[in-house]
Amino acid sequence: MSTSSIESTIRNFLVTSFGYRGATADLGAEVPLLDQGILDSTAVLEIVTFFEQDLGIQVADEEMVPENFGSIARLVSYVNSKKSSN
C-alpha cells in the first residue's frame, strides 16, 4: 500500500468517523488532531481498532502516544513504520 493510499484510507476513516468533530476531506496533514479536539482518548481507541481490523497492524499500548496519533501525517508515518517492520 502506497503512502498516498494509506493517507487516503486514514483520511476517509477520520471523515466518516469524526466528521462531526471537524475532520474534513481537506483537513491538512499536519493539523494537530488532539489539540483541535478532533480526536480524544476514545477516538484513539477507535483508530487502533481500525488499524488492527482493517489494516492488519497490531498497536501496542505504549505506541498510543501523540507522536504517533497527533496528526494525519503522524498516523501515516506510524502505519508505514509498522508495515515496513512486518
Image (spheres, grey):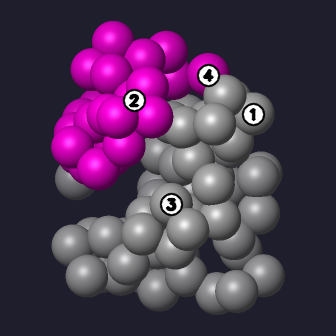
Disc 1: CA contacts within 10 A as few (<14), some (14-19) or many (>=20): few
The reply to whether residue 3 is in sight is no
Numbered label attached to residue 35: 1
Tag 2 and tag 4, C-beta contact below 8 Å:
no
Residue 79, x across and y down, in percent: 47, 59
Residue type, mark 2 in image: Ala
Compared across the picture, whether 67 is left or right of 74 comes to right
The reply to whether residue 80 is in sight is yes
Tag 1 and tag 4, C-beta contact below 8 Å:
no
Disc 2: CA contacts within 10 A as few (<14), some (14-19) or many (>=20): many
Of labels 2 and 4, earlier in sequence is 2
Tell me what residue is drawn at x 77 percent, y 51 percent: 67
Residue type, mark 1 in image: Asp
Q: Nearer the viewer, mark 4 or mark 3?
A: 3
Please state the extent of the stretch shown in magenta in the rendering: 3-31
**Magenta stretch mostly in which secondary structure?**
helix
Numbered label attached to residue 23: 2
Residue type, mark 3 in image: Ala
